Amino acid sequence: MTNPKPPKRPAAKINKSTPADLPVNQVLLGDCVEVMDSLPAKCADLVFADPPYNMQLGGDLWRPNMTKVDAVTDPWDKFKSFAEYDAFTRAWLTAARRVLKDTGTLWVIGSYHNIYRMGAVLMDAGYWILNDVAWIKANPLPQMKGTRFCNAHETLLWAKKSADQKKYTFHYRELKAGNDDKQMRSDWYIPICSGSEREKRDGKKAHATQKPEALMHRVIAATTNPGDLVLDPFCGSGTTAAVAKRLGRNFITVDREERYVEVARHRLADIAPALLTSPDESGVLLGAPKPRVPFISFIESGRLPLDATLRLKGTEARASLHPDGTVSAGGHRGSIHKVAAACLGLPTANGWTCWLFRDPLTDEEQLLDALRPG
Ligand SMILES: C[S@@+](CC[C@H](N)C(=O)[O-])C[C@H]1O[C@@H](n2cnc3c(N)ncnc32)[C@H](O)[C@@H]1O
């Protein structure tokens, strides 16, 4: 018997559908709602938003050694009231939903100051939350006054456009394979942006809230494909655009402050897109679970004709097929798994890797598993 050859995994999808007249791979100066309203509907594969936190900080914060804490006190973070902040949130989330493709998703990041307000507004706007992810800061800023817990995380909400949306990009199997074959969880331990990663102007931080590239890498690699369009309405220092460019994605990003637009453009000029593995070299993903395909679908499609028989690997036991997707062998009837287990005298078995069928295309015996994509 020849070894069953694993079917070739479909090449990693490369999205080439971005319309040519979009301001792709540009940092735009302006108000994000106005800019998004000027874009065609359903053009973006992903929106990542890191909006103002509305921190409402009063006076300056000082460390015990009397050095000033570099807190977010910028005018872009000031709103007169929660109502004003909510109205602003509603406006940009609505504009973002219009530009998202029906297969697209949205990420928002925030702290306890704003994430709950944004969560409520986005649910009211029709989005459907897929996950909330805790970005746990490996090196958080200490709590200076000693009056509360040290605030060591921010929250990201990942949402699809509506509860009914069936398709969206999520590289579950690749993420698992890249995480020692363990499911990627919703607690991400990533250090805050510091050292040489920090964009600087005249020796000072160029932006108060620059996010770490590692965080954006996880988001973009997990939920987009090469060539996708990533839109960030709150550019800041340009972290989203920088990582999108590095990972071979397209981007559009906006900031209403000229100085940040200049910082981001400068940063992007230094970034070369990564040499991504060509789809031909990407290979078959080893050890990752195959997608769930019901056995009956191969009978329904005629790939396994009803008069075919299956042979239990290593034995001469044969099973016949039934139109409802069950099989029978040795006086047992049930799923390919249950019948294989019963024939082998085992508590459980994986029918996909126990049963062989004769492939009419090659006239060779193959494991049922060869039928499943993956
Ligand atoms: C939290 S920061 C984003 C930081 C960014 N993620 C980074 O890594 O550098 C928010 C940014 O949104 C910008 N901003 C605030 N309101 C805006 C608006 N209405 N339109 C466009 N940009 C806005 C601010 O100028 C600020 O740079």
Image (cartoon, helix red, strand yellow):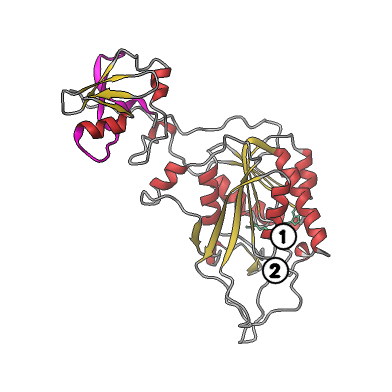
Ligand 1 lies in quarter: bottom right
Instruction: State which tag comes first along the sequence, 1 or 2.
Output: 1
User: x and y percent of residue 172 in the render?
Assistant: 46, 43
**Residue 2 picture quarter:** top left
Q: Can residue 365 be seen at all in this image of the molecule?
A: yes
Residue 251 figure quarter: top right
Left or right of 179 in this view: 29 = right
Relative depth, front residue between 206 and 296: 296
Q: Secondary structure at mark 2?
A: loop
The residue at 68%/54% (across/down) is: 119
Which mark, by number, is residue 360?
A: none
Residue 29, given in percent of the width and then of the height, sits at 76, 50
Quadrant assignment for the N terminus: top left
Compute the Cα span from label 1 to label 2: 9 Å
Q: Name the residue that disc number 1 marks.
A: 52
Residue 160 relative to residue 94: left or right: left
Q: Amino acid at mark 2?
A: Val
Mark 2 sits on what residue?
Answer: 72
**Percent position (x, y) of residue 83?**
82, 59
Percent coordinates x, y for residue 213 in the rendering: 54, 56
- From this viewpoint, is residue 254 visible? no
Q: Is mark 2 within 8 Å of ligand 1?
A: yes
SS type, badge 1? loop
347 in the magenta segment: yes
- Does residue 275 appear to the left or right of 194 in the view shown? left
**Can you say whether 19 is above or below 105 in the image?**
above
Residue pictured at 53% horizontal, 67% vertical: 195
Magenta stretch: give its range: 344-372
Residue farthest to the bottom, as pictured: 65
Identified by mark 1, the residue type is: Pro
Q: Is mark 1 within 8 Å of ligand 1?
A: yes
